Each structure stands twice: as structure tokens, then as C-alpha cells.
Amino acid sequence: MDSDTRRKILHIQVLPKLSGVQRISLEIFKSLSNEEYDKYILFSGDAADGSLTINCVEEFEKAGAKVLFSKNMCREIGFKDIAAFIEIYKLCKKERFDIVHTHSTKPGIIGRIAATLAHVPLVIHTVHGLAFHNYIKFPKWQFYWICEMFASFFCAKIVLVNHYYSRYFKFFKSKLMTIYNGVDFSMYKN
């Protein structure tokens, strides 16, 4: 397949370590043909343990992905978020991705809006967990909920890992789908 017909896909994550969320992207990339897809993953510049980062990068490269690091995206909310938004927007405009798939709250909010404004044809967000939960105070809960709901206007699909989360996305029922996380039991010896 020539480069004109290959589809370009970008996943946006936070930390470059192989925890649950990153493994989901890795499994998706492993299942996509290297002949049909140009695969990219963007991690924040937040430093994880060096050996964890190296292992993560190696695994994604083995799956045929180009690993990118954001200079501005980080876990904390702050002024760098504006720079991260601009950085992701410019990346999407330059690379002309066909699909952008965001994961988790922070990259999901910034990434969905930037990708949509950059005219990426398909923007998907997976909710692996919620930043607005019972263990934070109401003003912060409300702020996170408003940010999540606003960003939900900027995607075609919202993938939930359980039905429980759907109660928070009532305004976006037509965008929702649930795909349960799975466990690859072949990784465990009997």
C-alpha cells in the first residue's frame, strides 16, 4: 500500500510507561497493519523512571509506532496547557492525521479540542477513569466535569471501559460505546 492510501493514527497519552492505559494503545497498535497504518504515539514530557520509559518506547517501536514526546503537556493544570494545545494542534496540522485517539483526562481535553480544530476527520476519546470522583471536593469536581463535558463536543466517539461511567455522559449518548478492558491470559504461565 502506498503512502497516499495509508491512514495516519495518533494516540495521545500522559506518561511513557507501560501501565494499563498505555498497554491499551500498544495492543491497538499491534493489531493494526504496518502496511495500512502509519502509527504515532505522543507522550507527555513528564519524566517517568528512565528504564520504564525506555521499555515503553521499545515496545511501541516494535509495534511499528513512531514515539513522540510533548515539550509542554504535563499532568498538572497550568499555563503550559495552552502551549501543549498549540503544540498538538500544529502536530495535527503538519502530519494530517486521519485518526486521533486520546486517553485519560488531561490529554483527552487538550488533544480532542486541538485535533478537531486542526480538522482531523476522526477523533476518539477513551475514558479509562474519571478526574471527577467522590474523593475530591465539589468545586474541583465541578471544574473537571465541566472540562470533560466541554471537550466531549470535540470528538466523534467516547469509549468507556464500563457502563458506570455512562451516567456522567448523558448528553452524549449517541457518541458512547463501551469496550471492557481485557486481560491477555497467555502472558501468565499455568
Image (spheres, rainbow, N blue to C red):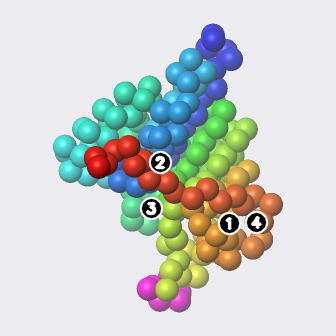
Q: CA distance from mark 3 to mark 1?
A: 19 Å
Residue 124: in sight, yes or no? yes
Amino acid type for the residue under numbered disc 4:
Phe
Per the rendering, the mark at residue 172 is 4
Pointer 1 or 2: first along the chain: 2
For badge 1, the amino acid type reads: Phe
Which label sits in the foreground, 3 or 2? 2
Sequence-earlier tag: 2 or 4: 2
Of the residues under marks 3 and 2, which one precedes in the sequence? 2
Above or below, comparing residue 61 to residue 111 in the picture: above
The amino acid at mark 3 is Phe
Residue indicated by mark 2: 24
Residue segment shown in magenta:
135-140
* Residue shown at the point (61%, 74%) measured from the top left: 164
Q: For the residues marked 4 and 1, what is the alpha-carbon distance in whole angstroms? A: 11 Å
SS for callout 2: helix
Disc 3 to disc 2, C-alpha distance = 29 Å
Contact, mark 1 vs mark 2 (Cβ under 8 Å) = no
The residue sitting at the front extreme is 190
Residue displayed at 48% across by 33% down: 30
Q: Is residue 127 magenta?
A: no
Mark 2 or 4: in front is 2
- Where residue 7 appears, as percent x and y from the top left, is 64, 26
Q: Which residue is mark 3?
A: 79
